[in-house]
Amino acid sequence: MRLLSGLLFVLASLLRRPLLAWVQTRVAPSGLPQELGLDPTRPVCYVLAARSIADQFVLEETCRLHGLPPPRGGYRDMPKPGRAGLVALPRLEGRGMQRRYGNPVEIRRLVTQAIVDRDYEVQLVPVSVFWGRNPGQETSLLKIIFSDSLRAGPLRKLFIILFNGRNTFVSFGRPISFQAFMAQDLEPQAATRKLVRVLRVHFRRQRAATLGPNLINRAQVLSHVIAMPSVREAIRLEAAAERISFEQAEERAWNYADEIAADYNNAAISFVVRVLTWLWNRIFDGIQVHHAERLRAFAHQHGVVYLPAHRSHMDYLLVSYVLYQQGLVPPHVAAGINLNFWPVGGLIRRLGGFYLRRKFGGNKLYSAVFRAYVDWLMSRGYSMQFFPEGGRSRTGRLLTPKTGMLSMAVQSFLRNPDQSIVLVPVYTGYDKVMEVGSYFKELRGSQAKKNESVGDLIRATRVVRMAFGKSYISFGEPLALAQFLDARQPGWRADLAACPPGEWPAWFSEFVVTLSYEVMARINSAAALSPVGLVATALLASPQQTLAEDELCEQMDSWLGLLRTHPYSEDVWVPDLDGAGVLAYAEKIARLTRIQHPWGDMIAAEGRDAVLLTYYRNSVLHLLALPSLIASHFQQREAVAETELVEACCELYPVLRRELFLRWRDKETEAAVRGMVGALVDRRLLERDVTGSLLRRPPVTSAEFGSLMGLANVMRESLERYCMTTVLLAENLPRGFIERGEFEQQCHLMAQRMAVLSGRRAPEFFDKALFSSYIDSLKRQNLLRPDPVSGDRCLAIDPQLQRMAEQAMRYLSVGVQQRIRRLLSRPRG
């Protein structure tokens, strides 16, 4: 038998080169070997899920290409420092009820060695080799022949390699400390069984995370959805309300389900991945992925819902593409029904897209079918993705979240609270967004929003001739739904049990709103500071959108230093460049004007290009919001008492927090402000007097003064909008109330006029949604109170707003104060 095994190995060795020439592999994690953190002084032993010569060859080649110690000598040699070992878990043997796992000889040898020599340490690295990424269909005969299997024989393995070898994926697990495992003082047989069990669980979970659950034929999916009790009841009610037969109402439900459901197809995904790889390489300088490693820690143990920011149609494909490349199964993605047009609609379905209407319009049957489909996805363990904003941001800011889909996800969890659901916020960013020109036209009103069409698809082919810099995908801190409920609603399980069937606790709606804002804050906490966004922020903060090149670089160096020593959050990425490097990078992508002059070049953002830059500034504006708020106190004053500054910032912070989805809760504001003041002092952007209680700005002639004033202007537009809102509210104090719709229109018109008078062309300055957000924030602070009779339509004004309006003026320059007062003194229609 040993002779036969040796002959087979020799034969396989002859096929090694053609095998490796045919196979194309992707590897996760992408940062090998740093991600594994192997200790070079200790031996390494790789563990495969099953013995396979092909898997061994692929592992050896992968280790060689990525700088890892390759396994030497096959399965029989013990690992030593500088010479990695290799073991494999035993396969199932026997048939039917008599099947059991074989003898784990290699693992028992390691265990015995560790018992004999207590100082023996080895780093066990589990490695999963996937030939293809197809989980298979539960009714598919092709799965028997071509889908990867740990029990494949030599002939079937050959077919698997031939058909799937170009799409091979190698996943390295976190090293297991063998010494720590053996410290439990188990006898050899028990220790071997336990170690094998731990490794089997790892491989099973890794397979689930990479391939996902088995796929079910789409017709069966529709049958499952229509058969759900909630849908059957909705069909009965539809038949009674519309006075039609049950069969006719059931046919409507079938049509709705057919309109909604995805048709997930692995062949389509493999094809599109190849196309997208070509496309991304053509239009991007690279895709920067941050914090993907945190996904692997729970993706195989939880149902995952990805919640990305929505800035471009590219988001649909880019997030799924990145997950696929990271070795995780692409999610089912909720897509607007506007994308369901030929030939894109069918392709999106095959990539896992399912469609939803923008508004359900009171259609209870459609709502029941859609909710049932979401329930089915989550109960089967499929990962899911939807955009919490509901649509693409036209300004670069995160939009106020729409809670419909999130509410359905939470309800699905509450119907089965034993399932483990994790929400993953995802920051998406771009050096250049391909739709930004159309966003500008829509905001100005010169172009209405329109549905996508084949014509748009044809015109979009022009993007392959354009350069978009880099794209940025950053996975924020995951949010376990059960733990978040425990923290915010400690008695939620009892409340849920007390509710009648089909109803939810009284706190449910408010909880979903709180959850949605937490998700948005976590998206912003994972932001990537793109060089274009930083240059845009600095230029747009200057009075004429123009700065001398050396001053611009000095400011950016100062801000970069601040963000590195006192980052907005631990998850924020800051480029490893100085100010000059940032400018050189941005000039290749953004349309900046370089004005040459004997005393030194000047950099300007002019006309329409300056307006387009506001999009990229807004996507990173929150990173500098708090230091900008602090710096704004020193525009008109040379010195401010720290206590006064902290109180003023704490009063205004709730408004800014809601607008920009800032990470600190209201009760954490004081500590955050004091910490940022200390950072500004450390960077010499502020100075303390001898008593330590008074803060001064640096000398006017210093570079630090220019950086501080530039920082103060970063939030200038937000502060002006806040000032206009509070001053207009104070004007209405004699009436005691405002009519919300009319007041929002007055704010919009006033900001529009301010924009023209001050030379601003950016339409987002007078965006109605921002004023609506201000009013909501003031309501939450109880400064505006809904009328008991008319509700939110009519709001009572708290007299405290008079003082707030007077304080708000301090943030603005004398010229802007004068302009606002003159506008208020004029009669308004």
Image: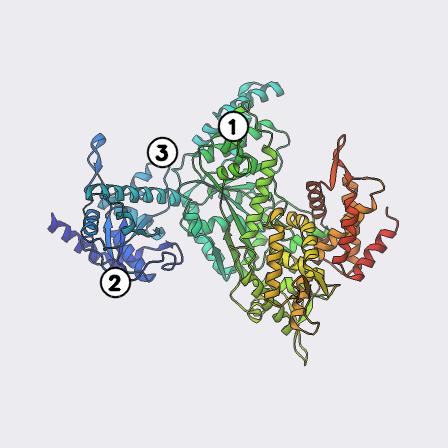
Q: Secondary structure at mark 1?
A: helix
Residue placed under numbered mark 2 in the picture: 82
Residue placed under numbered mark 3 in the picture: 139
Image side of residue 133 versus residue 549, left or right = left
The residue carrying pointer 3 sits among few (fewer than 14), some (14 to 19) or many (20 or more) residues within 10 Å by Cα, namely few
Q: Secondary structure at mark 3?
A: loop
Residue mark closest to the camera, 1 vs 2: 1
Can you give x and y, in whole percent of width and height, for residue 384 in the image?
48, 41
Relative to residue 630, is residue 551 depicted above or below?
A: below
Q: Marks 1 and 3, how far apart in space?
A: 41 Å
Q: Are marks 1 and 3 in contact (CB under 8 Å)?
A: no
Can you give x and y, in whole percent of width and height, for residue 619 in the image?
61, 55
Between 638 and 284, the residue placed more toward the observer is: 638
Res 78 visible: yes
Can you give x and y, in whole percent of width and height, for residue 801 in the image?
77, 46
How many labels sit on residues? 3
Q: How is the image coloured?
A: rainbow
- Name the mark on residue 494: 1
Q: Earlier in the sequence, mark 1 or mark 2?
A: 2
The residue carrying pointer 1 sits among few (fewer than 14), some (14 to 19) or many (20 or more) residues within 10 Å by Cα, namely few
Residue type at mark 3 is Thr
Residue type at mark 2 is Gly
Residue type at mark 1 is Ala
Q: Marks 3 and 2, how far apart in space?
A: 47 Å
Q: Secondary structure at mark 2?
A: loop
Relative to residue 396, is residue 354 depicted above or below?
A: above
Residue mark closest to the camera, 3 vs 2: 2
The residue carrying pointer 2 sits among few (fewer than 14), some (14 to 19) or many (20 or more) residues within 10 Å by Cα, namely some
Relative to residue 505, is residue 452 depicted above or below?
A: below
